[in-house]
């Protein structure tokens, strides 16, 4: 393993952070303790996998030495160990390579989740509401907090649009691959002849920007207040608690009427606006990422899809990674762990492959092969 020195340094850093968490000076400083604990947690998985790799490598070396002995019984036991350990070391090596990939700076951020009905009319709006419920249930299992900032209901009881802020631990790292067009195939409740209809919704997952990421100048925004609509009790349509913020330089408009308090609605609206401005800035800095997101979300047309939900077959297919799961009923109840893990593994592996190709170009020939002398 050619990155053992780097991993040794990571382990030393982890041990130093662990020791400092017992230092009274750190314990008595809540901000410092929180930062230290966060840094330690970020290294914990790498260190655990590295230690498992190191032990497996030591055991393999011992098994190979034992296999050289004359005793037939010992040789057989050693060969069994070698057969077990070699694939385990390969697995641990691949896991370490993925863990050492450059970290996405947005992984620890909260997210702005936007779900909109696409093609399919009422059926699309019904599915949009169900998908939001799916993410809300997953968030509940993860102990994340979901705050709806705005929603638009359809006449059929679905949702034309739902925008929500999701706060918690590593939210963006787990949801960032959910952006795109989601296609549903099923018999709508309004269908009299039992025909399967195809509808689509769009899902966008944006990292929430901090104050330090995007600063909103007072001169750049116009704030309008209006009466809330929809459920909310006696204050609905009687107080100007709903807030609409227009960002004048970009023309972005954000509304929030979820809270009864105008101050709370404005705070939520500013968080949404800040996230959208952050995304615009990210697109400027990294055009390829911006283009990738646009291609995923697209226009909501039936032909633009990253995932298909087929209710008749209880099947979910993610077309990007070639994964099909026959447990759609469980997935719609928020059991997204296997799917999210598979997406992360696929896209991280692709990043690793791209990084290896770049390293081949830097250190060898343009096609990734080493130069011959």
Image (spheres, helix red, strand yellow):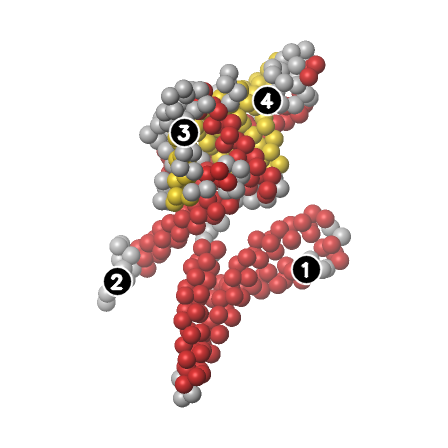
Give the total number of marks visible in the rendering: 4
Q: In this view, does 354 lie above or below 312?
A: below
Q: In this view, does 41 lie above or below 136?
A: below
- Residue 366: tell me if it is visible: yes
In this rendering, which labeled residue sits more in front, label 2 or label 3? 3
Q: Label for residue 20? A: 1
Residue at 53 percent of width and 59 percent of height: 46
Give me the C-alpha separation between circle 1 and circle 2.
Answer: 47 Å
- Mark 2 highlights which residue? 371
Could you say where residue 344 lies in the image, as x and y percent from the top left? 45, 47
**Along the viewing direction, whichever of 19 and 353 lies nearer the viewer:** 353
Contact between labelled residues 2 and 4, with CB atoms less than 8 Å apart:
no
Residue at 65 percent of width and 23 percent of height: 259
Of callouts 2 and 3, the N-terminal one: 3
Could you tell whether 111 is left or right of 280 in the image? right
Give me the C-alpha separation between circle 4 and circle 2.
Answer: 59 Å
Give me the C-alpha separation between circle 1 and circle 4.
Answer: 44 Å
**Along the viewing direction, whichever of 142 and 173 lies nearer the viewer:** 142
**Quadrant holding the N terminus:** bottom left
Q: What element carries label 1?
A: helix
Q: Is mark 2 on a helix, strand or loop?
A: loop
Of callouts 1 and 4, the N-terminal one: 1
Q: Label for residue 186? A: 3
Q: Label for residue 256? A: 4
């Amino acid at each position: 393993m050619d990155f053992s020195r780097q991993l040794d340094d990571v382990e030393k850093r982890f041990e130093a952070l662990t020791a400092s968490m017992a230092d009274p000076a750190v314990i008595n400083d809540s901000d410092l303790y929180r930062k230290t604990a966060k840094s330690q947690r970020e290294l914990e998985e790498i260190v655990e996998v590295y230690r498992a790799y190191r032990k497996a490598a030591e055991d393999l070396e011992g098994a190979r030495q034992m296999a050289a002995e004359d005793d037939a019984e010992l040789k057989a036991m050693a060969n069994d160990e070698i057969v077990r350990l070699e694939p385990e070391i390969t697995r641990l090596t691949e896991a370490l390579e993925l863990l050492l990939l450059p970290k996405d700076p947005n992984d620890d951020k909260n997210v702005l989740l936007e779900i909109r009905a696409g093609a399919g009319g009422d059926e699309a709006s019904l599915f949009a509401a169900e998908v939001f419920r799916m993410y809300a249930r997953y968030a509940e299992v993860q102990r994340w907090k979901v705050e709806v900032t705005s929603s638009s209901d359809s006449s059929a009881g679905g949702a034309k649009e739902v925008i929500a802020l999701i706060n918690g631990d590593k939210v963006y790292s787990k949801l960032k691959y959910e952006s795109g067009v989601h296609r549903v195939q099923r018999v709508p409740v309004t269908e009299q002849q039992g025909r399967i209809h195809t509808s689509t919704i769009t899902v966008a997952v944006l990292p929430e920007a901090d104050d330090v990421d995007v600063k909103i100048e007072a001169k750049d925004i116009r704030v309008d207040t209006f009466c809330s609509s929809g459920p909310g009790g006696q204050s609905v349509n009687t107080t100007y608690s709903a807030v609409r913020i227009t960002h004048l330089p970009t023309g972005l408009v954000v509304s929030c009427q979820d809270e009864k308090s105008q101050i709370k609605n404005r705070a939520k609206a500013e968080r949404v606006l800040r996230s959208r401005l952050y995304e615009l800035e990210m697109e400027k800095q990294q055009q390829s990422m911006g283009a990738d997101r646009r291609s995923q979300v697209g226009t909501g047309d039936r032909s633009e899809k990253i995932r298909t939900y087929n209710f008749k077959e209880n099947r979910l297919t993610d077309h990007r990674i070639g994964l099909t799961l026959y447990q759609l009923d469980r997935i719609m109840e928020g059991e997204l762990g296997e799917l999210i893990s598979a997406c992360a593994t696929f896209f991280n592996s692709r990043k690793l492959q791209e990084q290896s190709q770049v390293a081949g170009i830097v250190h060898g020939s343009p096609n990734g092969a080493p130069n011959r002398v």
